[in-house]
Amino acid sequence: YKKQDKFEGVNGLGTIEEVFERLSNSITAAKQS
C-alpha cells in the first residue's frame, strides 16, 4: 500500500504531483494580485 495511493484515497485531491502543481499555481496567483 503505497503512501501516494493512501494520500490520493484519503484526500481525493489526485496525485502528490497534482497537489503541488495546484499549490504552485495558487502561490503564483496570490503574488500577482
Image (cartoon, rainbow, N blue to C red):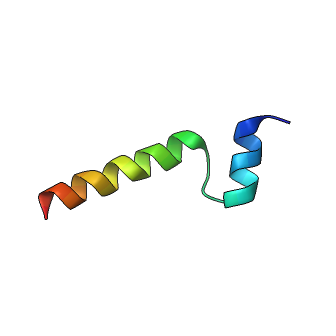
Residue shown at 17% from the left, 55% from the top: 31
x and y percent of residue 10 in the render?
74, 57
State left or right for residue 21 relative to residue 9: left
x and y percent of residue 4 in the render?
70, 39
Residue shown at 75% from the left, 43% from the top: 5
State left or right for residue 30 relative to residue 7: left
Dividing the image into 4 quarters, which one contains the C terminus? Answer: bottom left
x and y percent of residue 7 in the render?
70, 48
Q: Quadrant of residue 11?
A: bottom right
Q: Looking at this rendering, what residue extends furthest in the bottom direction?
A: 33
x and y percent of residue 18 in the render?
51, 46
Dividing the image into 4 quarters, which one contains the N terminus? Answer: top right
Q: Quadrant of residue 29?
A: bottom left
State left or right for residue 13 relative to residue 25: right
Residue shown at 74% from the left, 37% from the top: 3
Q: Looking at this rendering, what residue extends furthest in the left direction?
A: 32
Q: Looking at this rendering, what residue extends furthest in the top direction?
A: 2
Q: Is residue 21 above or below residue 13?
A: above
Numbered-mark total: 0
Residue shown at 52% from the left, 39% from the top: 17
